[in-house]
Image (tube, grey):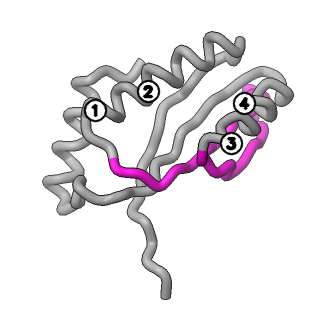
């Protein structure tokens, strides 16, 4: 599980690297499961809440299916911790093997 301390360290490193944590960023969220159907159902639910489905694919050699979602949003340490906790609970409620965490990237400006 991702702890509040982990998130604090992430934010510290990002600020040190020059990231503006007071702006919207592209946050990616990952779920994994042995079969695809529960991930497809979860994807539909979260799309209705403003998340974009980036991909559902199968990894090898473990043959787990992965759901990658993305949402452009601003987070504080507390809001990201809450999001992670909510997703851990959601995975458990929907009998999905795991919420596997998040990543982040800058929002690319339109050219």
Crowdedness near tag 1: few (<14), some (14–19) or many (≥20) residues, C-alpha within 10 Å: some
Which residue, given by chain and number where applicable, does mark 4 sit on?
Answer: 42
Helix, strand or loop at label 1? It is helix
Instruction: State which mark lies toward you, 3 or 1.
Output: 3
What number is the disc on residue 20? Answer: none
Q: Residue at x 32, y 44 (%)?
A: 75
Q: Which residues are magenta?
A: 50-74
Which of the pair 59/55 is nearer the observer? 55
Whether tag 3 and tag 4 are in contact, CB under 8 A, the answer is: no
Q: Main secondary structure of the magenta part?
A: strand
Instruction: Work out how far the residue at label 4 is from the one at label 2, CA to CA, in angstroms.
Output: 15 Å
Q: Earlier in the sequence, mark 2 or mark 3?
A: 3
Which residue, given by chain and number where applicable, does mark 1 sit on?
Answer: 7
Crowdedness near tag 3: few (<14), some (14–19) or many (≥20) residues, C-alpha within 10 Å: few
Q: Residue at x 46, y 48 (%)?
A: 27
Q: Earlier in the sequence, mark 1 or mark 4?
A: 1
Q: Tell me where residue 4 appears, x and y as whole percent.
A: 26, 23
Instruction: Work out how far the residue at label 1 is from the one at label 2, CA to CA, in angstroms.
Output: 10 Å
Crowdedness near tag 4: few (<14), some (14–19) or many (≥20) residues, C-alpha within 10 Å: some
Instruction: Work out how far the residue at label 2 is from the one at label 3, CA to CA, in angstroms.
Output: 18 Å
Q: Earlier in the sequence, mark 4 or mark 2?
A: 4
Which residue, given by chain and number where applicable, does mark 3 sit on?
Answer: 48
Whether tag 2 and tag 3 are in contact, CB under 8 A, the answer is: no
Compared to 96, does 74 lie above or below?
below
Which residue, given by chain and number where applicable, does mark 2 sit on?
Answer: 84
């Amino acid at each position: 599980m991702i702890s509040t301390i982990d998130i604090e360290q992430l934010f510290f490193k990002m600020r040190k690297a020059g990231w503006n944590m007071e702006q919207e960023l592209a946050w990616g969220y990952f779920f994994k499961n042995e079969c695809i159907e529960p991930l497809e159902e979860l994807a539909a639910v979260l799309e209705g809440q403003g998340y974009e489905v980036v991909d559902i694919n199968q990894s090898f050699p473990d043959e787990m299916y992965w759901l990658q979602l993305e949402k452009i949003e601003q987070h504080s340490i507390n809001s990201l911790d809450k999001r992670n906790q909510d997703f851990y609970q959601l995975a458990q409620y929907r009998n999905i093997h795991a919420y596997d965490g998040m990543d982040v990237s800058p929002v690319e400006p339109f050219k």
